[in-house]
Image (spheres, grey):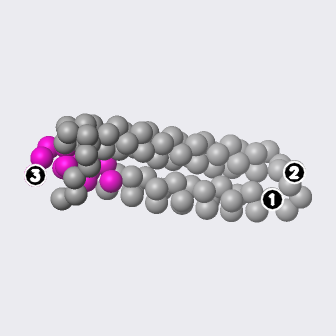
């Protein structure tokens, strides 16, 4: 197995984990928003929204970074294979 192939597999695993974390953060954020009946949160509700929003933003950023890295690794592999993508 080529070193780049193992790197691609690792990135795909990391992306799977990061995507699951992103989905969980999205679910938590929606739950916090739904928990505020009037839409006007009291101070504790504002903190909960802020924390959930930060977690969701961090999860999105991880997924985006992994997608960029995976894309670059795949493009690198195609370039190394002489411009054609080869299937294992």
Q: Which residue appears at 19% of the width and 49% of the height?
A: 5
**How many angstroms separate mark 2 from mark 3 (CA)?**
56 Å
Give the mark, 2 or 3, whose residue is nearer the N terminus.
3
Instruction: Name above or below for residue 77 compared with residue 22.
Output: above
Residue 63 on image: x %, y %: 46, 46
Residue for badge 1: 36
Q: Can residue 73 be seen in the rendering of this structure?
A: no
Please name the residue that numbered disc 2 is placed on.
Answer: 40
Q: Are marks 1 and 2 in contact (CB under 8 Å)?
A: yes
Q: Which residue is mark 3?
A: 1
* Along the viewing direction, whichever of 16 and 57 lies nearer the viewer: 16
Q: Residue furthest left?
A: 1
CA gap, disc 1 to disc 2?
Answer: 7 Å
Residue 88 visible here: yes
Snapshot quadrant of residue 87: bottom left
Q: Position of residue 15 (x, y in %)?
A: 39, 52
**Residue segment shown in magenta:** 1-12
Is residue 6 one of those drawn in magenta? yes
């Amino acid at each position: 197995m080529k070193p780049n192939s193992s790197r691609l597999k690792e990135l795909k695993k990391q992306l799977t984990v990061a995507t699951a974390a992103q989905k969980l953060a999205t679910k938590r954020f929606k739950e916090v928003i739904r928990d505020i009946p009037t839409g006007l949160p009291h101070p504790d509700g504002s903190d909960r929204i802020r924390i959930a929003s930060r977690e969701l933003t961090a999860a999105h950023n991880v997924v985006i970074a992994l997608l960029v890295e995976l894309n670059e690794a795949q493009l690198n592999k195609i370039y190394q294979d002489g411009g054609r993508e080869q299937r294992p």
